[in-house]
Amino acid sequence: MIKIFDLFLKHKEKIAYVFWGGVTTLVNIGTYYIFAHILHIGTMISTTIAWILAILVAYITNKLYVFNSKSFNANIVIREFISFVICRLLTWGIDLATMYIFVNILKFNDMIIKTLSNVVVIIINYILSKLVIFKNQAN
């Protein structure tokens, strides 16, 4: 039991990231589904709206629960958020390109491609968050 707890403590950040990444992915995919399948809005617009909502959820959960950046100093929050959005723009581009190529051109199932795209995006986002955005936090 102690080994399991030690293992948990050793990987706490990654476990939190996977959990909150899952929540963010549900927000992203759920929002996409609502806009694309219920409201019948196009793939690119639905993907963008889903991305914006997911970004807000991801920033708050990453700051507070994954990387434990507890500072609410305006300069730190602004720097973090701008860095966060810039890095997420990169992965948004990957998500859009993936959806465009595999759904609009190759006609694959949009929900399967959206899910697979989110897996890749989550991995890249973790690396960018760890190495760029929240790398030197004075909690």
Image (cartoon, rainbow, N blue to C red):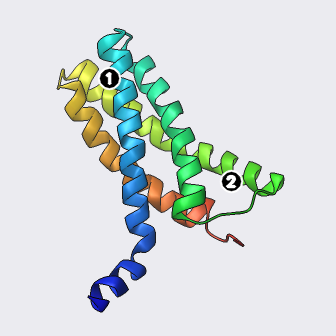
Residue 56 location (% of width, % of height): 57, 39
Question: Most extreme residue toward the top, as rendered?
Answer: 40
Task: Left or right? Give the position of 138 relative to 66.
Answer: right
The residue located at (43%, 63%) in the rendering is 16
Front of the two marks 1 and 2: 1
Residue 124 lies left or right of residue 88; in this view the side is: left
Q: Please identify the quarter of the rendering in which residue 111 is found.
A: top left
Residue at numbered disc 1 = 33
**Residue depicted at x 69% and y 71%:** 139
Q: Nearer the viewer, residue 1 or 76?
A: 1
Q: Nearer the viewer, residue 128 or 38?
A: 38
Callout 2: few (<14), some (14-19), or many (20+) C-alpha neighbours within 10 Å?
A: many
The picture places residue 94, in percent across and down from the top left corner, at: 41, 39
Q: Amino acid at mark 2?
A: Glu
Q: Residue 106 appears in which quarter of the rendering?
A: top left
> Where, by quadrant of the figure, is residue 68 drawn?
bottom right
Secondary structure, mark 1, is helix
Who is closer to the viewer here, 97 or 75? 75
Is residue 89 in sight in this rendering?
Answer: no
Q: Secondary structure at mark 2?
A: helix
Quadrant showing the N terminus: bottom left
Of marks 1 and 2, which one's residue comes earlier in the chain?
1
Residue drawn at the location 45% of the way across and 59% of the way down:
126
Give amino acid for label 1.
Answer: Tyr
